[in-house]
Amino acid sequence: MNRQQEFVLRAVEEREIRFIRLWFTDILGYLKSVMMSPSELEGAFEEGVGFDGSSIEGLSRISESDTIALPDPSTFQILPFDTDHPELQTARMFCDITMPDGQPSWSDPRQILRRQVKLAADEGFTCMISPEIEFYLFQPGADPGSIEPTDNGGYFDQASHNIAPRFRREAMTALDAMGIVTEFSHHETAPGQQEIDLRHADALTMADNIMTFRYLIKQVAAANGVRATFMPKPFTEHAGSAMHSHISLFEGDTNAFHDPDDEISLSKTAKHFIAGILHRAPEISAVTNQWPNSYKRIVFGNEAPTAATWGVSNRS
């Protein structure tokens, strides 16, 4: 047992953690969870938790259904909004999915990302990501079964008379409690639409942070009597929601994308990086825009990408 695992076991005992959630995602990005008591944690560190991988979307075939969830102790955090009873504290860890022989699962999104991070590291690069995450707050509408935005605010509106400012304050507090550093939060262009920007982190950490973000946002919304949705285009008449991601590569402490002698300050590495994204835009779109509703957002004139092209100020 390594030091991180020992630290988690000690923290669980000292903080009197009652439940532990082990998280992972399916290929569509849905958060999956299994909860255990602290008495089972040491065994989970040593052997993992077995489950039927064929019942998880895109994870494995029936003939390969035996899969293992191995908790990553470096992701241990106490959930601030998991229960109304402080005496029943719950913690969570993300898991890496493996096969019974210990080999990483070929279809586990976290393992896939880990492989890509290693490929970049082998070339001397570290990938850093900072996302701007948009979402809507909504409530039941006047007609049965309908929904409506929680406010009529617009871009950067304070809107002190409605729920939005308090919600964003509570959301940022919850994120901070989970070790997720936020930079800014504000009302977006459409009624009920919010944005919270996260401080940059390495790719794997940010992937974990984004999944935690989505969970916490929905928890904070429920605590305020409303609901949150990350649906790309929930309202036809209003702007869609996106996750604009600032991506950079570093070689040690040096920004590999920057060249002060270039006309637009971009290095050859940056230009090759952009070219790679453009070349693989169809494949990338299959992952980032996987629902029919995704394409209702991608309309010319709405600051959504409708063409595989690039320019300094080009948002087409």
Image: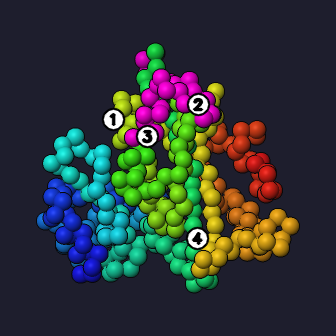
Q: Quadrant of residue 262?
A: bottom right
The image position of residue 130, as x and y in percent, is 57, 58
Q: Amino acid at mark 1?
A: Ala
Q: Amino acid at mark 4?
A: Cys
Q: Is residue 274 left or right of residue 223?
A: right
Disc marking residue 169: 3
Residue drawn at x 46%, y 20% is: 141
Q: Is residue 144 above or below residue 303?
A: above
Quadrant of image for the N terminus: bottom left
Circle 1 sits on which residue? 223
Task: Pick whichever, 73 or 61, lies toward us.
Answer: 73
Circle 2 sits on which residue? 157
Q: Which residues are magenta?
A: 144-170
Q: Amino acid at mark 3?
A: Arg
Q: CA distance from mark 3 to mark 1?
A: 13 Å
Q: Is residue 293 visible?
A: no
